[in-house]
Image (spheres, grey):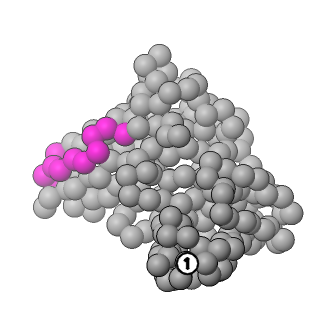
Amino acid sequence: NAGVTQTPKFRVLKTGQSMTLLCAQDMNHEYMYWYRQDPGMGLRLIHYSVGEGTTAKGEVPDGYNVSRLKKQNFLLGLESAAPSQTSVYFCASSPPPDHSGNTIYFGEGSWLTVV
Amino acid sequence: SQQGEEDPQALSIQEGENATMNCSYKTSINNLQWYRQNSGRGLVHLILIRSNEREKHSGRLRVTLDTSKKSSSLLITASRAADTASYFCATDRGSNYKLTFGKGTLLTVNP
């Protein structure tokens, strides 16, 4: 049972390069998320999607773009990488919340270094 | 901005002892969740407590919620070395699905 799978796990980029982080989930979840985790900052929401073909900005969207062309996939793009985007990126997914909220399922993380 | 703030930032105890971590938040919530993160891994959901609940148990975990004080605590009883991890509280701030995470408490359980 794979759950949420992120690729690549590690990547080093030069400033100005572009790349795409891939996320796939096999739980048929409607909602998907991209978070970044930095030391001393906790997790911050970059973008999220509440269904196929939809995306929305989170807390720290600048410098990132996303696409949700298929329900099971959520792509995070960096068009022109900057050192400030050095971070650990987590993809997550969840079913639609019920009246009590929802549980989010996380991938294992992608370590990105921009030099 | 951070909604939840965990306290303490780091906690070191001996195996068999209880560990208590606290979380404070600023605005009203629908529910509060606790997650665990082992070093180098993703976050794993532990427990969810609704705003109309005061206490919840799951195995060796006990969570309390005091909405009047906007705070929650996570108690891990009879801790084990395998409990060594970072623990995060997460609140929904009304959206019910866009969780806001605190900075976490790093728990070290020494064998």
Could you say where residue A106 lies in the image, as x and y percent from the top left? 56, 63
What range of the chain is rendered magenta? Answer: B6-17
- The location of residue A71, given as percent across then percent down, is 80, 68
Left or right placement of residue B64 versus residue B98 in this view = left
Of A20 and B91, the residue lying toward us: A20
**Residue B54 visible in the shown view:** no
**According to the image, label 1 marks what residue?**
A15
Residue drawn at 49 percent across, 83 percent down: A12
Task: Look at 75% across and 57% down and name the residue there.
Answer: A49
Residue A68, by quadrant, is bottom right
Amino acid carrying label 1: it is Thr
- Can see residue A15? yes
Location of residue B72 in the rendering, given as x and y in whole percent from the top left corner: 41, 31
Q: Secondary structure at mark 1?
A: loop
Residue most extreme to the top:
B68
* Residue B82 vertical position relative to residue A114 in the rendered view, above or below: above
